[in-house]
Image (tube, rainbow, N blue to C red):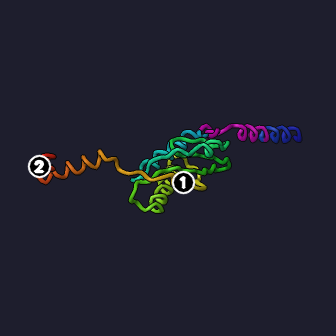
Amino acid sequence: MEEKEKHLTEEETSEGLESTETLDSSTVTGSVKISEEVIAQIATQALLSVKGVQPASPGLVANLRLGKKSSSGVKISVHDGEVPSIAVEAYVTVKYGLRIPDVAWDVQESIKKNLEQFTGYTVKSVDVYVQGVFFESPQKEEETAQSSAETEGTSPPERSEL
């Protein structure tokens, strides 16, 4: 009778092992890695969505930094961890007449929001480097003046009238 009890105990043990070895078919294992180029593209699009900002070239010194990828005025550095984190350097030019600290803050917020939303990574920092200012082109100013004169029903005076 002891043999029978011993045998049952082994069967119970083997059944227990089988159930722990079987993986749940609905569980997927693996990892997802997002390339730094993709992260840089997302950051660049976020940068371009801010009114009055254009990407600038990071410059020769910034391009020599190792371990960082750049794309249209944005440099990305990804730090691996349980939840990866991102450090961003944004090189921009700002439209003349806009308050630079406000525009820089808008750039930081836009990049942070978009990267966290689309990648799920934590944004550790967004450093904004204002490389210069830009002006509206004279051609655009002439077109604006001409279109406003047309909407008023009058045209600008001809040279001969002056």
- x and y percentages locating residue 154 in the rendered image: 11, 51
Q: Which of 74/120 is in front?
A: 74
Looking at the picture, does residue 22 appear above or below residue 138?
above
Q: Secondary structure at mark 2?
A: helix
Q: Nearer the viewer, residue 158 or 37?
A: 158
Q: Secondary structure at mark 1?
A: strand
Q: Earlier in the sequence, mark 2 or mark 1?
A: 1
Q: What residue type is disc 2 on?
A: Glu
Disc 2 to disc 1, C-alpha distance: 48 Å
**Amino acid at pointer 1:** Tyr
Q: Is residue 27 magenta?
A: yes
Residue under label 2, please give it: 161
How far from the left and from the top, in percent, is residue 162?
Answer: 14, 51
The N terminus, quarter of image: top right
Residue 126 location, x and y as percent? 56, 55
Q: Is residue 75 left or right of residue 106?
A: right
Question: On the rendered structure, is 146 left or right of 16?
Answer: left
Q: Which x, y percent locates residue 18?
A: 73, 37
Does residue 85 belong to the magenta stretch?
Answer: no
Q: Residue at x 19, y 52 (%)?
A: 148
Residue at numbered disc 1:
129
- Magenta residues, as a range? 13-31
